Image: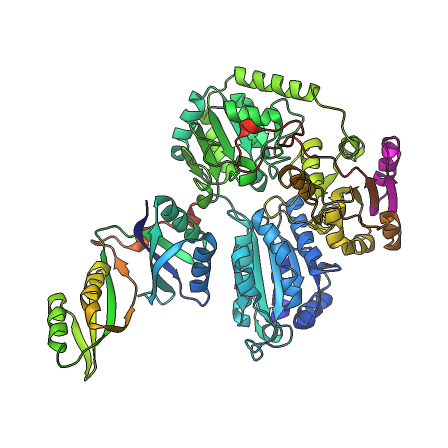
Amino acid sequence: MMNRYTISALVSNKSGVLVRVAALFARRGYNIESLSVCKTEDEELSRMTIVLNGDEYILGQMMKQMDKLIDVKKIMRVEEDAVSRELLLIKIRTDASTRSQVLEISQIFRAKVVDASPEATILELTGKPMKLDGFVTMLMPYGVMELARTGVTSISRGKTTIKDETDYKERI
Amino acid sequence: MKLMGAEILVECLKEQGVTTIFGYPGGTVLDIYDALYRDGTIEHVITSHEQGAAHAADGWARVTGKTGVVLATSGPGATNLVTGIATAYMDSVPVVAITGNVGASMLGRDSFQEIDIFGITLPITKHNYIVKDVNDLAGIVREAFRIAGSGRKGPVLIDILKNVQSERAEYVPQKIAPPHAKVVPARDLKDAAQAIAAAQRPLIMVGGGAIAAEASAQVRALAERIDAPVVSTLMGLGAFPASHPLFMGMMGMHGTATAAKLCLESDCLLAVGTRFSDRVALNRDKFAAGKTVVQIDIDNAELDKNVTVTHPVLGDVKEALTTLIPLLPAAKRTFSAHAKELKQAERAAQKPPELGHRILIEAAKLAPEDAIVVTDVGQHQMWTAQYYPFERPRTFCTSGGLGTMGYGLGAAIGAAKATGKHVILVTGDGCFNMNLNELSTAVTQELPITILLMNNHALGMVRQWQKLFYGHRFSQTDVKKRTDYVKFAESFGAKGLRIDRESVIDGVLKEAFATPAPVVVDCQIGSDENVLPMIKPGQTYDTIMTEWEEK
């Protein structure tokens, strides 16, 4: 059964790490929905959040294969209850007749207007990917000129962190 | 003390105990070659082609268990290593490949002999580096050797910019402790031990991981303690002595009928350092269905990858078996007696061998006892695996995973150089032609290599598949080269001999094995000798074909 899974990983903050991970997905034929990379509180480490489509087998293989990469230091599956957010910027075709309707939809979703011009409005929304999907669907009829999404980033609830995971390379 | 990058590299190689490297000089490694020249303590073997050097480093590593080293220049020098690196990667062989690259000021400008070997080797190395700062060099070299030689072993590439080789940095010598595998705790093995003890018909599958972990003694102790028959993958040959009564031969596509039957009958597979490749499991969904499967592997990603495993054990095979064996009650089983009967019956039913087989059987009898056997890829490789009795680990080098035609001669050079022992290279006329340039290396190095060239004037294995699956349409496999390999050998300064009938086998082989230098034996065999038994790709073990049949 195809599902959507999210993986977080701490990786070396070095050039070439992203290409290593991306090349691994390509070679093994994994289907990635989104991949986001950011700096962390430790300047030697970056954090990757990967959303993939697949089944439990693909998820397991992907985590194990990633774990084998020397530059991958910690890896964990993001549980359903984790805090997951994505940021959307969307440019909608608006004129005097449609602007108020678009703004009304924005209010329902608590999106922010970040730019307005006579023919277009740019909105910003942060939330779970499903919320962003819903927002985009609602705006479709007005004419989506372009949109950009950051991909999901996640962090687990409570006091546990990704640093509590064991690195497979330390176990052998 | 401040040293040049090239000197730091040489010092770091010496730290690792490197005595011999294989390679080929060029523009961007001149500083390294100069440092090697000035140092004078590391022997460098120059090959005819960088591919040969990469295979030589691989052969060196397989017979010694130590990390092999290959050195090449940028651009084509580096790309010529690729097949050799990929071969080592697929068979988990520890190799450190060192390449030069253009200087920092030239990088990214498509300079002469500039290539992104880091990018090219990304998916075929365990890890790779591009060194842009001389201060990082020593740390990277040490880490590269640690990565290549620990865990699931494999090749690591270090690409060093030309300017880094001549720039200076502080070098502090280090004593290198060999990496140690971690102990596998008993709690990880309790369930597996219970499952094995409860099994009626346990079968041990031994793979290349047992050799990599130096676990031959433990595999033997395990088999004898639980009285379980042992089958081996191609990569596992030598891990368990062929002459041992519990040894039932190779398994897989061209394994013995006995091994196939035992795999079908067994209720518990104990997979020791094997990854159930498609050439072993064939039909991965059905191969182990319904059986208890204990898989011990050092690579977490291999557990449960190809077949579903009921008892995965992560860890070094030697450490895991050391913990496991005392947990198992000693037993005597009727299954092993049954296996011995099957083996005996299969042997008794064997037809008189054709010339190719005959030569291998005689070679096994006449070869020096400690000889090392290397093969290329194809029919001759399978015949060797089937007919040559491997008694000890690290006496057999073959490209199992990548199936690299042209692997053999380079690997034979590495194996001979490493051990000083007599090396028998079994090859075919197809494979030999791919890298026969290295015969000149073998001659220059005065290496005792006997090349049994199974010359069937065809690409035999592909031809066999064309017979089975493509209606005898021999598209590009009837090669019919006119090469006279005896004269060829002589022109390279080697000895050339020929076997064209059974009566001369004994004399020719004795002469070859008595010659402490390269000998090419042109073995004129028929084009239609097949490899049997055979299980067709993706099929189940019960469909094993022991007689040639075409449908």
Q: Quadrant of the C terminus of chain A?
A: top left
Whether residue B370 sits left or right of residue A41 in the image: it is right
Residue drawn where x is 60% and y is 39% of the image:
B235
Q: Position of residue A170 (x, y in %)?
A: 42, 49
Q: Position of residue B226 (x, y in %)?
A: 51, 22
Which residue is situated farthest in the bottom direction here?
Answer: A118
The vertical placement of A79 against B32, above or below, is above
Q: Position of residue B29 (x, y in %)?
A: 66, 69
- Quadrant location of residue B279? top right
How many tags in the picture?
0
The vertical placement of B106 against A157, above or below, is below
Residue drawn where x is 67% and y is 68% of the image:
B32
Q: Which residues are magenta?
A: B496-519
Q: Quadrant of the N terminus of chain A?
A: top left
Residue B516 is a magenta residue: yes
Q: Is residue B197 visible?
A: yes
Q: Is residue B389 visible?
A: no
Q: How is the image coloured?
A: rainbow
Q: In front here: B198 or B260? A: B260
Residue B90 is a magenta residue: no
Whether residue A68 sits left or right of residue B437 in the image: it is left
The vertical placement of A149 against A76, above or below, is below
Whether residue B341 sits left or right of residue B190 in the image: it is right
The vertical placement of B376 against B321, above or below, is below
Q: Position of residue A91 (x, y in %)?
A: 24, 75
Q: In front here: B533 or A154? A: B533
- Quadrant location of residue B45? bottom right
